[in-house]
Amino acid sequence: MARPRTITDRRLLDALGVVLGRSGPAFTIAEVARQAGVATGTVMQRFGSKHGLLLALSRDHRAGQAAAIRAAAAAADSPREAVLAGALVGYEFLDNAEQAANNLAQLGVDLADPELREELALGYATVNAELAELLTAAALPGAPAPEIAARILGALASGAAMHWSVRPHGRLVDRVRADLDAVLAGWSRPALGEESE
């Protein structure tokens, strides 16, 4: 009879998240194992390699994105706040410039790897679909079509994170929120000529 697993994938993937923030793409399996409090062989047996570990993290992150966006939006007080909360999911944990820069450095590595790039594409598609649904419900009068608006907000959040990691002022989540809110505020205003109708 097989022994039950006492070390969960969640524990190992959470450890990888911490290590990526600290070391970026230079991380080692040994660092992940130390962070998780397990033997290096345990991580290797479970995931096989750094690549396997990164694929598992990407898939795990994507699996939780839709639910996280829906939960953040459900807690919001208005349709605009729901869109804003949904677009901010994932940025809360990047709390300092070094951590953000290390995660962005890993993003560069992911883009160069076909399998990891495909996982990124699926993740962005998930986020865009959820944001498009929120934008449809929000019915902001000056917004472009929901699919286009979702793509704009996703690109703005990613770009703001990159810019902030190079020139950090305040907290990243506050910077991304301010930039997203500026766009949403513009889309919430009636178009010229509609005010008098």
Image: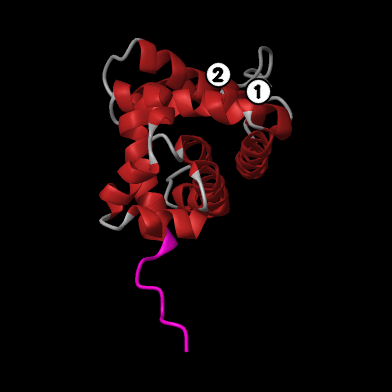
Label 1 CA crowd tier, 10 Å (few <14, some 14–19, many 20+):
some
Position of residue 91 measured from the top left corner of the image (x, y, whole percent): 41, 34
- Of marks 1 and 2, which one's residue comes earlier in the chain? 1
User: Which residue: 69% across, 33% down?
Assistant: 114
Amino acid tagged 2: Gly
In the rendered structure, the answer to whether residue 31 lies left or right of residue 137 reads: left
Which residue is more in the foreground, 61 or 44? 44
Q: Does 2 appear above or below 10? A: below
Q: Which mark is residue 142?
A: 1
Tell me the CA gap for discs 1 and 2: 7 Å
Q: Does 117 appear above or below 162? A: below
> Which quadrant of the figure contains the C terminus?
top right
Label 2, on which residue?
A: 186
Magenta-drawn stretch contains 119: no
Q: Which mark is residue 110?
A: none
Position of residue 111 measured from the top left corner of the image (x, y, whole percent): 61, 27
Q: Main secondary structure of the magenta part?
A: loop
User: Which residue: 47% across, 42% down?
Assistant: 78
Amino acid tagged 1: Gly
Q: For the magenta stretch, what is the residue range?
A: 1-9
User: Which residue: 54% across, 21% down?
Assistant: 156
Position of residue 121 measured from the top left corner of the image (x, y, whole percent): 67, 36
Q: How is the image coloured?
A: secondary structure
Mark 1 and mark 2 residues within 8 Å of each other at the beta carbon: yes
How many numbered circles does the render carry? 2
